[in-house]
Image (cartoon, coloured by chain):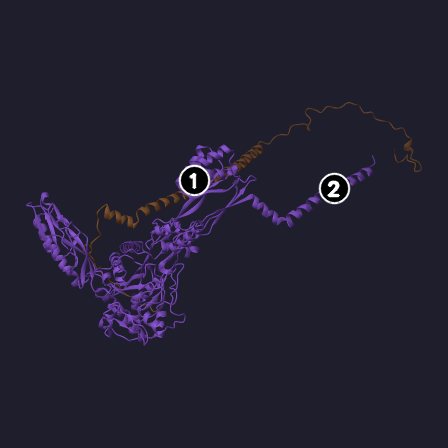
Chain colours: A brown, B purple
Amino acid sequence: MSLKEKNVAYDLSLFEEVTINQQDNVLELPNKGSKTNKKRKTNPFFVLAVSIFSFICLGIVGTVVYNQVQLTELTANINSVTKKLNESEGVYTQLQVKTESNLSLSIVEDYAKNELKMSKIDPAQIEYISLSKGDKATIKNDKW
Amino acid sequence: MARGTTIRMWRRSLFILMALMFLGFGVSIARLVQLQIFQGENLQQMAIDQQLKDTKISAQRGTIYDCNMKPLAQSATVWTVVLESAYLPDNKTKELVATGLSEILELDKNEVLEKAKKKSYYTVIKRKIESDVKDKIIQFQKTNKIKSGIRLVEDYKRYYPYGDFASAVIGFTGTDSQGLSGVENYYNDYLTGESGKLVTARNAVGTDMPFDYEKMIPAKNGNSLVLSIDEVIQHFLEKNLEEGIANFNVVNKAVAIMMDVNTGDVLGMAVRGGYDLNHPFDIVDDNMKKEIESFPEDGKAKAKAEALEKQWRNKAVSDTYMPGSVFKMVTASMGLEENLVTENTGFNCSGSLVPFKGARPIRCHKHGGHGAQTFLKAFCNSCNPAFISLGQMVGAQKFYQYYDGFGFTEKTGIDLPGEANGIFFSKDGSMGPMDLAVASFGQNFSITPIQMAVAAAAVANGGYLVKPHIVKQIIDPNGNIIRTSEREVRRQVISEDTSRKLCEFLQLNAKEGGAKKGYVPGYRIGGKTGTTQKIGQSGPDGLDYIASFCGIAPADKPQVVLLVYYDTPKGGSYYGGVVAGPTFQQVMQDVLPYLGIERKYTDEELVILDIPTPFLVGSSVSEAKNKLERLGMKPVVYGSGDMVVSQIPEAGVKIPKGGTVVLHTAQDTENKTVKVPKLIGLTPSNANKTAVASGVNIVIKGAISNGAGAVSVRQSIAEGTAVKQGTAVTVEFSVQNQPTED
């Protein structure tokens, strides 16, 4: 309603007939070529970048896991070898002790005398040699 | 719908939600605060205890070496067999395990089965098994597919490669590798390392998760000891002591100590009647074993414990004895140092001396008396009256001062456990006149053998009382030296001049006096014998004695002192010169060349020196004859051949100059025999003449320094025995005027 026709005392618009626009119950199907339903255009560089990045991440994770596995295996190997080393050292000491006990001076002397019929070295067989002590000089240093 | 209602509803819902959230989370937060802050520490500890497994890593005990780095004691890894019977699934497996283990470990099967049937996670079956047994157990587990139930826990075992060698010095360790005697005990703190720890995570079942968490604190192995003991010298001491024990039926052990007089290094300390360090709890003495068996059951344990204590005791440092005449070298030093006597001061011996009015006479060992003699002669005669007079000249106060100065009132400080101190007449050193009289010749007070050796070293080295030590160095597991024992002089007791004079006295005593049996041709030996009555300690048979000999070498510049001491010889003689002298001589003959000390024969010694027979088989007869004649030997040739096919005596056998060497040039002449003549009761030259005339040779043994007074007492082949011509017969000589009581 226009302002000219307005009556300030009464709102005459309330008395006017209201025409209802009937809408058609016809739904418009979206156009096939509609912009809103169009597929987005994929950026190949983006895809490549994402792929490369994924591979790199996978590679890093894989490497880390592999390293950990290697470390774990090496640690286990080291422990096993250390254990073997300790055992071998123990066996070595035991065998050494057994050998030494069979080579004690009393056993050796007994064997030499009784089995090999050896006798002690005679003093006449020993010749003492005097070695010259060589030239030497004494340096006196008062500072010391 | 009105907007106001919706908002209100939202707000209400929100409020309720907030309230519920606050309530719910608040309780959680409160609980968190309680757990984290108030109970946090306790719970953390509980979690650690539950989630972590703490395994002790044993440290290896240090090694004990001799001075040449030869191991005398070392540890090696062994295993303890532990049965975790709770993991054995059924009775069949338990039976199998019990059978297998009992067979491998040589145990009673029923005992093992009983342990297997218990529900336990840790039962020790056997300790300290070696690697071969451990391998058998592992094989048994593999063969029978036993994955759990038997566990092998690492441990260490102490090995002593030479058994009873130096047993009193080295000592042994107990089940927990703690030192129980000897150097093992004294230096236990150095030898024991520090245990490490292995902390690993474990799951709820108790299995290790080492890949989850593992932290290791490595064990710190113990330090090693390098002793001053020389294995070779120790061997010589022990070998010759054993011979002396056998020859003279010594019933209460024997001791020999050899020490460097200048540094205090103990080069050898032998206590025979020793024990195997690998089996220290086995009684060695058969008589002791029988005695223990004779005890009733309830007394056996105590008897065995006492017997073991006696067996382990180091007689050289823990037992005291009366030194007897060996102490005269100390009394003589007092007199010379105080200028109370010189070597020519006159003394008279009538066979006994009354020390003061009203006292009973004290007899000399020579009942007829030595007559008039110089002090030097009195020393060589070991004359008691002369020394009583000397003691009176010194006086009780001065005597005690020197007694104290020579270290007899205090322990030597040697690094061995259980060192005893001597026992004097009184604590304050006061002596009555009779005490002084008998103390002058070494009676009625007691000292330890190590104290006597240290005092003798002081007499020989210029008067310096040095501290003896067994350990020369302590080294860490990497071989770095962390401690060295240096020469430690406690004080100077006598002057160098007095020391030099005493060395001359001792040298003369060994050449012409009572210590002739200890004489070694070619070396300047000094020595003093001692025969001490064990007053108050004698056995049921009557009086028992201690025979000792203490000497130095070389006497002109002493390097070593040797004390030999036999407790209770029961075989024929008990005199120091007779029993201990030959041992001293033999040890010095072995040790001095080993130490590189050159033999220097005097002209008199060269005359009576035995010569080794040269090797002549294969030589021509003329060559052999020339060789023998050049050496002063007499060749006798049998057969008509040109070449020597055999000789008697064999090459290397020593015979005196002028001895006969028989050369056979044909096989059929080798059967010619002669009869051994009587060689007992003759002087060396007469014995040699008699032997040569009969066609045999003699090898001289015993006191023969200059032949004076020596008479043959024993021959190795009996008179009348038919032997091949030229056979060497060993003849033992003894000095006729040997002091019988000193």
What's under tag 2, amino acid-wise? Leu
In what quadrant of the picture does the N terminus of chain B appear?
A: top right
Please identify, in this view, whether the residue under mark 2 or under mark 1 is nearer the observer: 1
Q: Looking at the picture, does residue B533 appear above or below residue B210?
A: below
Tell me, yes or no, if residue A90 can be seen here. Answer: yes
> In the image, residue B158 lies at what x, y percent?
40, 49
Write down the residue under mark 1.
B107
Identify which residue is drawn at 29% across, 72% down: B361
Residues B502 and B441: in front is B441
The residue carrying mark 2 is: B20
* Residue B576 shown left or right of residue B415 in the figure: left
Q: What residue is drawn where x is 38% and y is 65%?
A: B422
- Residue A57 lies, with reference to residue B377, above or below; the image says above
Looking at the image, is mark 2 or mark 1 earlier in the sequence? 2
> Residue A86: horizontal and vertical position, in percent?
41, 44
Distance from disc 2 to disc 1, alpha carbons, whole Å, reads 71 Å
Q: Nearer the viewer, residue B559 or B664?
A: B664
Residue B639 x/y as whole percent = 7, 46
Q: Position of residue B480 (x, y in %)?
A: 39, 55
Residue B383, quarter of the rendered image? bottom left
Query: What residue is shown at x 37% (from left), y 64% (from top)?
Result: B412
Q: Quadrant of the C terminus of chain B?
A: bottom left
Does B48 appear above or below A69? Answer: below
